[in-house]
Image (cartoon, rainbow, N blue to C red):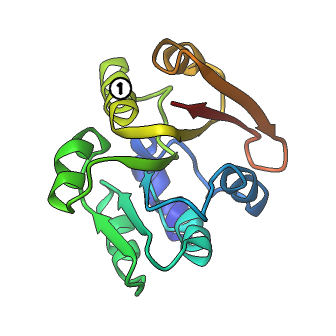
Amino acid sequence: MTFFKEAIKSLKTSGSLIPSSKFLVKRILKNVDFKNAELIIEYGAGNGIITHEILKKIKPSATLVCFEINEVFYKELKTINHPQLVVLDASAEQIEAEIKKLNFSEICFVVSSLPLAILPKELSKTIIEKSFKLLKTGGKFIQFQYSTKSLKLLKSIFIKKIVVDFEPLNIPPAFLYICEK
């Protein structure tokens, strides 16, 4: 219910009225190589549906950094007591400065729930470009959306490899973009 209330208040930044289904979460995370991931970034972590599942799978030496600008969701994420979790009340466009503060120089995986289709185009482009720059070779930017509107933007940055997937068992059904550097 908290998710629904917050989504109504801030639909332009949440992008959905209900959390992701377990089917979508499973489809997203099958694209993460948890054995080799040292740093995983989650953009738009919301109430932590994906966050909790990542924390169940990461190796003991890995770190998960969640970016969440919604104050209610940020506070909810901060209640997750896990030593490998860092929750930031920061925009994804601040990725470079934030990971530098944490003594990281590259990212293994980005899991993004950002509503790229409704964010200002320049903001979406900046976030994706900065993420690409920081991804290690072979790293992946995994984005889900409810339309194909952002595919052109992703293809302009991840020019080598993008796999498009679809999860019908989500409300609404979701497209998944697996973009590899």
The residue under the point 40% across, 73% down is: 77
Could you tell me residue 132's position as x and y percent?
40, 31
The residue sitting at 33% across, 47% down in the picture is 106
Using a 10 Å C-alpha cutoff, classify the residue at mark 1 as few (fewer than 14 neighbours), some (14 to 19) or many (20 or more): some
Measuring from the top left, give residue 124's x and y in whole percent: 38, 27
Q: Which residue is mark 1?
A: 129
User: Which residue is at a point 52% across and 46% down the rendered structure image?
Assistant: 113
Say which residue appears at 45% left-offset and 18% top-offset: 157
Judged from this view, the residue extending furthest toward the right is: 168
Q: Quadrant of the N terminus?
A: bottom right
Place of residue 26 in the rendered image (x, y in percent of width and height, measured from the top left): 74, 59
Q: Quadrant of residue 142?
A: top right
Q: Amino acid at mark 1?
A: Glu
Q: Left of 111 or right of it: where is 98?
A: left
Left or right, residue 95 beside residue 131: left
Say which element carries label 1.
helix
- Relative to residue 52, is residue 25 depicted above or below? above
Q: Position of residue 130 (x, y in %)?
A: 31, 32
Residue 84's quadrant in the figure? Answer: bottom left
